Image: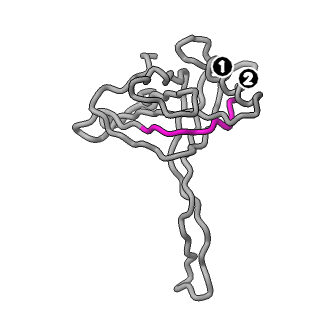
Amino acid sequence: MADAFLGRDVPVYIALQSTKPTTLASTQYIRWGAVRDREWGPELDEVDVTADTSAGVFRQYLSTYATHDVSLSGVTSIKDTDNLDEIESYFYSKMNAAEQVEVWIKVFRPSSDATNKFRSYEFPANMKTFKITGTYDDASTWSSDLSGTGAVDVVDVVANAPVNPAP
């Protein structure tokens, strides 16, 4: 299936700060390396507004608040370029100081637009978890969950997106 792409072609970047990185300071983003699984996307909360005057037998709902959650997992790596130690240290330092673990996330994926090569998603988030699993007879892995805290900028870009190094 030539029109598909592999998950490894979807790099994830993180800025360990609460303010949005500026274009001139794009080096504030670091690659979140050793990622195997990436899941992100919006979800709308809803409330049931069904009443005795509602037509038919179907419930009625209204959308209320939006969330944009991210779930990542991967192999625990000791490569400097994977930045896992830096991300973990940031998480613990904020948590130990009783502060919100605020970050900015930027995800790229190949685009279906013939003109643009990539689509990027950029948004602020709170890191909720950063867990490491050390199974006795398997590779050590990590996982992290984040909740978006603001609007998501979805941009189709012509330029080449940053890419993960070849496996």
- Look at label 2 and name its amino acid: Thr
Element at badge 1? loop
Q: Pinpoint residue 44: horizontal percent, then vertical percent.
A: 54, 57
Which residue is depicted at the point 46% across and 16% down?
Answer: 167
Q: Pinpoint residue 140: horizontal percent, then vertical percent.
A: 68, 20
State the residue position of label 1. Answer: 139
Magenta residue check for 95: no
Which residue is depicted at the point 43% across and 23% down?
Answer: 25
Q: Quadrant of residue 111?
A: top left
State the residue position of label 2. Answer: 135
| Colour pattern of the rendering | one colour
Q: Nearer the viewer, residue 89 or 75?
A: 89
With respect to residue 100, does 88 lie above or below? above
Q: Are marks 2 and 1 in contact (CB under 8 Å)?
A: yes
Q: Is residue 58 left or right of residue 5?
A: right
* Magenta-highlighted residues: 121-130
Element at badge 2? loop
Q: Which mark, residue 85?
A: none
Q: Nearer the viewer, residue 5 or 70?
A: 70
With respect to residue 158, does 54 lie above or below? below
Q: Nearer the viewer, residue 61 or 151?
A: 151
- Look at label 1 and name its amino acid: Ala
